[in-house]
Structure formats: structure tokens, C-alpha cells
Amino acid sequence: MRDLLRFLWALPRSLLLGAVIYLPGEAGILLRRWYYGRRLRRCGRNFTVMPGVHLDGEKFIEIGDDVMIRENVVLRAGVPSEEKREVLELGSYAGRQRGVVLIRDRARIAFGAVILGYGGVTIGEKCGIGPYSILLSESFHHQGKVPGRIYKYSQGAAPEEQCVLRGYVEMKDGSGVASNVLVLPGATIGRDAWVAPNSVVRLGGFIDDDVIVKGDPAATVFRRRYSPVATARPDRKS
């Protein structure tokens, strides 16, 4: 009986959410624009969300103008409970916010992409994320702070057995990642840089401006002729 009452209580909201996520055509686009426009931390003009997109943690998501998110994208934001998990942070959070996902004007996110924003993510103006690419600002790790302890990768493990790697992920204006690219916590992709298909931008990786990179780890294979000398990494001394 208790489960039945819970079902009847949750049914109207679930039906509305199902319509928001899966309603096709122009009606679905307009419904999602209205729905997320009242729930996101910021929602710019002409925000287009195609069917099958799952946005979680709306209060931690900021969307610029003319942003498009294609079918079946998963985007999660917010600050999860630490409980007893160990956390290893990569890079600096000066002027940045954990858990917030910022998507700037005219960015495009292709179908099937996954963005985990618990560590914070910025996707700059006119950036592109290719099909089935993954941006992780937080991930479980097999090592932690205590030597000799066996850390478990699964979320099903007890919190004291887990260790989390966290680092802000930033795609600077005009940059892009192609299909099936993995971007790990703490990575930065420079302005107008491009990451080739099936590449991995490693933990804390830094991609210069105006380059094309590929591989695992992603390495520069081409530098545009008009590009200045290699961009200095912010935390390196010139």
C-alpha cells in the first residue's frame, strides 16, 4: 500500500518530466525551453534541447545564448555529499566553483555526450563537443592518501573505501573535441584547439591554443601557421 501511494504521488511529476525529456518536434523544443528557463541557474536566449537529454542539478548549470544540446546527452552538475570519501584535487579553484557547469554562447554538444560537472566545467563560446565524448571533472580512483589501503572504484563500495579525483575542466573559446574523446579531471583545452577522435586528454592535461592533438595521451600533431609560440601553462614559470 505504501508503495502504491508513493507511486500515485510521484506520477504527475514523472509524466511531466517524461514529456519534457522525450517529447519530439518543435513542441518538445519549446516545452524544454520553457521548463529549463525557469530552473537553470541561468538560461540564455534560443536554448535548444533535443529529445532524450538528461540534465541533473539545474541550479548549478548556466547556459549562454544560442546553445544547442543534441539527443541523448547526459549532463550532471552540483556538489555531491563528500561523506567519508577521500578527495584528491588537481589544479587550482581560484575564481572557480565546484559543481557548476558553464556553457557559453553558441556552444554545441553532439548526441550521446556525457558531461560530469561535479568538479566544475566551463565550455567556452563556439565550442563543440563531438558525439559520445566524455568530460569528467570528477572520477573515482584506485589510489588514495593512505598507503596500503585497497581503494575500490565502484560507487557501490563503502564511502571510506573510495577515493575521488577532482579537477576543473575548461574548454576555452573556439575549442573542440571530436567523437569518442575522453577528457579527464583537471584538463584544459586551449583557445581554438581541436582534439582528434578517440583521443584522451589525461589528468591535469594542458592543450595549447591553436593546435590539433591526438592520441593517448593527446599530443600536438599540428600547429596552425598563424599561431604564436606555444602558450605557457598557467602554473608554469615562463
Image (cartoon, rainbow, N blue to C red):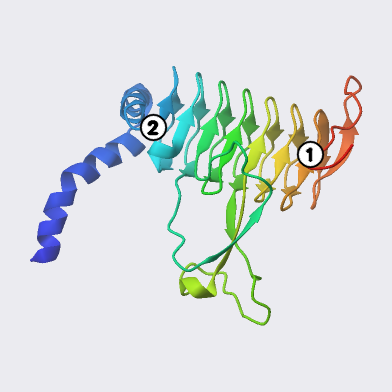
Amino acid type of the residue that numbered disc 1 sits on in the rendered structure: Ile
Residue at image position (83%, 32%) is: 211
Q: Residue 44: image x %, image y %? A: 45, 20
What residue did someone put label 2 on? 40
Q: Residue 172: image x %, image y %? A: 68, 30
Circle 2: element type: loop
Residue at image position (12%, 52%) is: 8
In the rendered structure, the answer to whether residue 152 lies left or right of residue 20 reads right
Residue at image position (47%, 69%) is: 84
Quarter placement of the C terminus: top right
Mark 1, Cα crowd under 10 Å, few <14 / some 14-19 / many 20+, is many
Q: Quadrant of residue 4?
A: bottom left
In the rendered structure, the answer to whether residue 130 lies left or right of residue 198 reads left
In the rendered structure, the answer to whether residue 34 lies left or right of residue 155 reads left
Q: Residue 141: image x %, image y %? A: 62, 65
Quarter placement of the N terminus: bottom left
Amino acid type of the residue that numbered disc 2 sits on in the rendered structure: Leu
What residue did someone put label 1 on? 207
Q: Quadrant of residue 170?
A: top right
Q: Residue 184: image x %, image y %? A: 66, 51
State yes or no: discs 2 and 1 in contact (Cβ < 8 Å).
Answer: no
Which residue is nearer to you in this view: 166 or 74? Answer: 166
Circle 1: element type: strand
Which residue is nearer to you in this view: 12 or 171? Answer: 171
Hey, which residue is sitting farthest left in the picture? 1
Decide which of tag 2 and tag 1 comes sooner along the chain: 2
Which residue is nearer to you in this view: 99 or 45? Answer: 99
